[in-house]
Each structure stands twice: as C-alpha cells, then as structure tokens.
Amino acid sequence: MHYSTFECHINTRQEDMETQRVREMLEATTLVVSIVAAIIIVRWGWKMVKWLWLNPKRLERVLREQGLQANPYKFWVGDLREMMKMHEEARSMPMMSLSHDLSPRLFAFVLHVLHKYGKNSFLWFGPTPRLIVTSPEQIKEVLSKPYDYSKHNLNPLTKYVSPGIVKLEGEKWAKHRKIIGLALNLDKLKTMTETFFQCCDDMARKWEKMLSSSNGKCEVDVCPSLMNLTQDVISRAAFGSSYEEGKQIFDLLTEQAELVATHLQRYHIPFWRFVHAKDFRRIKEIDRMVEDFVKGIIKKKEKALKAGEAIKNHLLGMLLESNHKEIESQRKHNNAGLMSMKDVIDECKFFYFGGQATTSSLLAWTMMLLSRYTDWQTRAREEVLQVFGNQKPNFDGLNRLKIMTMILYEVLRLYPPATWLERSCEKDMKLGNILVPRGVNIFIPTLILQQDQEIWGSDAKEFNPERFSEGISKAGKGDSVVYFPFGWGARICIGQNFTLLEAKMAFSLILQRFWFELSPSYSHAPLLRMTLQPQHGVHVILHKLA
C-alpha cells in the first residue's frame, strides 16, 4: 500500500514537471513570437515613418535650399486634397466658349502652383515631390536619358493601362523596342494600308447609308463611329481578326481604363484602396480575363507560324516573326532578353489600348476642329482631291499630304492624347543647375508647354496649322523639344507612324465623300480619361458631297 502511494506521488510529480516544461516552452515561444512581431512592427513602423515623414521632409529641405518653392508638406496626402478639390471645381464649370485653352480645366492646381511660386516650383503628390520642369533644355535632358529618368516607381495603377514596352526599363526595354520596331517600320506599315482603307471605307459607307435616308444631311455624334473604326483597325491590322472578334477585349479594357482613371489621382489617399476594394478587385479580374483572350489569339498565330504559314499583314504576326528571327540570330548566345509569352501578351494589350485610345482621341478632335474651321476643311479636301481624285488613297499619296499633316500636328499640339509626362529619378541627378535627389519625380506638363505664348507666340491658344508649314523643327521658336505629343527622344512613342497613317487614311476618305459643320448642340468639355477625350462626344451636321 505504501509502495503504491509513493509510485502515485512520483507519477504526479513527473506530470507536474512535464506540464511545467510545456508551460515554459509555450512561454518561450510566445516571447519569441512577441519579439519577432515587435521587430516586424517596429521595422514596418520605421519604414512608414521614413516614407511618410522623414524622406519627404529631407527631400523638401534639399529642394528648398536650392530656391525651389512649394506648399509645405502635409503628412501623407501632400497636396492631394487641394488638388482634387480644384480639379473637381474646374470640371464642374462649363466652358462658355469653344476655347482651346484647356489648362485651367485640366491643370488647375498646376497653374495655381506656377502662378504662386513661379517656374522653379514643385508640388506634392502624396509623400512624393514632383518637380515641375518647363525649361526646353531641361526637358530635353530628361527625355534623352531614359536610364537615369525612368518610369519606375510611378503610380502602380498605370501598369494596367500601360503594359508592355511602356513600363520596361534597361536592356529588356532596348530588346523589346528593337523587336517591335521591326514589326512597325514603314515597310511593314505600307502593307497595312489596304487594311486601313477597308476599315475606313466600311465606316464611310455606313455614313452614306445613314445620309441616304435623311435627304443627304443629318446631325450625328461621330465619336462612337470613330471609336469603332480605331477598334476595327487595331483588331484587323494588329491581330488579323475582325472587330467583332475583339469586341469583348475592347469592352473589358474600356471598363478597366475607366476604373483606373477614377482612382488614379486618389490612389495615395490614406485607406482609399481599402474603401474601394471592390473596384480594385475588378481591375485585377479584367486583367486576367484580357490576358486569357489575348493568349488564345497568340497561340493560334504561333501555331500557324510553326506550320510554315505565311505571315499576314498584321502586327501580331510580324511581332512573332521578328521575335523568332531574333531568337534564331542569337541561338548561340543568351536569349534572356527575348520576348516570352507573357511579354508578347503585354505588348498586345498595349497595342489594344494605346493604339485605339490615342488614335480615337486624335480623330475626334480633328473632326471637331475641321467642323469649326471650315476654311481648313476646304483646304484639306482640295489637297486630297488633287492627290487622289476620287480614287482609293494609297501609301505614297498619304505621305504627300502636306496640309493634312500640318492640321494633324496642330490638333496634337492643342489636344495631345497624353497631357503630361512623368519620370522618376533612379539616383541623384544634376538637371541644369538643380540637384534632383533620388526619390523626386519629374513632372512635364505637355499641354501647358504646347500652348505657352512665350514659345508659340500670341496665337498659341488658337488653331493655326500654318505654324507647321516648314515642319516641327521650325514651328514656334524653333525648338522641337517643346512639341512632344508622342513623347521625345529614345522613348518616343513607337506607334506614332501607325496612328498618323491611320488618321490620314480616315480623313482622306471622309473628305472625299462628305463635308461637315459643328452642330449647335456640341458641348465643349475636354475630359482626361487616360487620354484626352470629348466628354459629351462631337456632334456635327454631316452633308453628302454632291
């Protein structure tokens, strides 16, 4: 009996010791977890303090010591609240006349900063300072050094509407540009002229059919037709498919672009992404859906290419062909810089968005301006009829249209699709006499500069294509760097010739068959939806030429 009691006591003591060891292990584990969590929280907190306060204040001090001025930095939001308030107020006020002075409507806060602090100023986009650069010499330096002034570290939302080559840097950018350049050179564009004609002719026939049922005259908002045209051109010329095949992709990209435009300027407002999480999930969902659609198109084209089928006159086929040739020429070398399936998908998505949005903007504003300035419409028509008569426009003839080229250049000056450029400093840089520290973004207000009276003269805000009669280099004060609707330097838009050729074909056919005047119902309300678009369309009175 005594032995059993002793054994029970021993077992109880062992259980107590085991329990104690477990408790000690749990306490030790809890302590370790607490320490690790504390370290993570402290590190995260330190990073947040650096990002939201210490770095902005350091950058502010460096900029102010050089005589640059701005509003005092406000924790986290910077100038965003005031910027959005002024932007909404400017948009809510109707433009009482058909003024081409768009800066007060689109860049109210930037003008406010420039008027208050002068040209040597900067503004706060959240915790990031944006140095406003307006000097032609400084702009030239920024745009000619793409490796030092990059597109990295800009708003994360832009990756959804500017994929592909636009967001690439370094050697990968150089390799992609070389491959895409082979697919977009003038010889390849020449083969697409027939596709351009077919798409434009389809639109013109629809207009003729509409006029035939309304005694040769009717009012119409041309924006939907012009948008369908540019979508059809991209679908056929870029992918060899019809507009109907690509309609789902365009509808998705349009929805995505509108969501991105809604949240782009507010992205850095505290907790904005959490409050509007549903929209951000939809943006990502559309991205996956579009990628699947484009992947299907690419696989069909690659299969045809491997089967030895001839490349049709479309950009995707040429892009794949160029990439395959590049792989063959470098088979014995490292091919890491060549284009993967994901790379090709991103470039296709960029063609879809960039090619359509940029060209539709140019066509819409050209239609509005030619409707208002009918003397220039008449001059352009006379030139088209002199070069082509009533025959089908061809590649060589389109390149001889001097007046049309002048008109398109002036439209792009007054209504550039992209109204500003932004770059980030990858390291401390000397820009003229200014030391630009790493972490500062460069802001180039394209629209403001392209309407600057000091550069373009007293008629800078007026429509006058004659200023381009001797080309871009002699327009204004002769410094072509102040004219950059497609960018400038090494990163100039690789698709600008595609856009201009499409626009010349479209207006050659329109001018051969119609004359048009601006409708009294037209409401002048330029709006920035990723590209500059007319908010309420372009209403014109369309007439059939006798």
Image: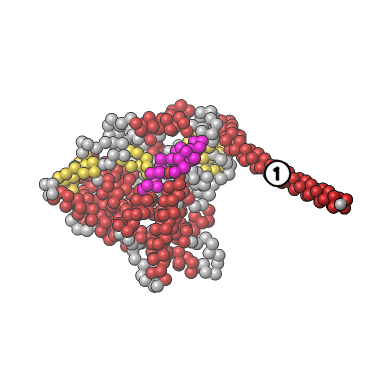
Does residue 452 show up?
no
Question: From this viewpoint, which residue is outermost toward the right?
Answer: 2
Question: From this viewpoint, which residue is outermost toward the bottom?
Answer: 308
> How many marks overall?
1
Question: From this viewpoint, which residue is outermost toward the front?
Answer: 1
Which contiguous range is marked in magenta? 254-278
Task: Tell me residue 162's x, y (percent).
Answer: 43, 49
**Is residue 37 in the magenta section?**
no
Q: In front here: 19 or 414?
A: 19
Q: Where 513 sits versus 298, above or below?
A: above
Q: Toward which corner of the image does residue 477 lie, by quadrant?
A: top left
Structural crowding at the residue carrying mark 1, measured as other residues with C-alpha within 10 Å and reported as few (<14), some (14–19) or many (≥20): few
Q: Is the magenta stretch mostly helix, strand or loop?
A: helix
The residue singled out by tag 1 in the image is 30
**Please, what is the three-letter code of the amino acid marked with disc 1?**
Thr
Q: In this view, does 387 lie to the left or right of 303?
A: left
Residue drawn at 30 percent across, 34 percent down: 99
**Is residue 266 in the magenta section?**
yes
Q: Is residue 199 left or right of residue 144?
A: left
Residue drawn at 54 percent across, 39 percent down: 440
Q: In front here: 529 or 246?
A: 246
Task: Tell me residue 179's x, y (percent).
Answer: 45, 60
Task: Tell me residue 159's x, y (percent).
Answer: 46, 48
Residue drawn at 31 percent across, 52 percent down: 230
Q: Judging from the image, what secondary structure is the residue with disc 1 in?
A: helix
Residue drawn at 33 percent across, 34 percent down: 101
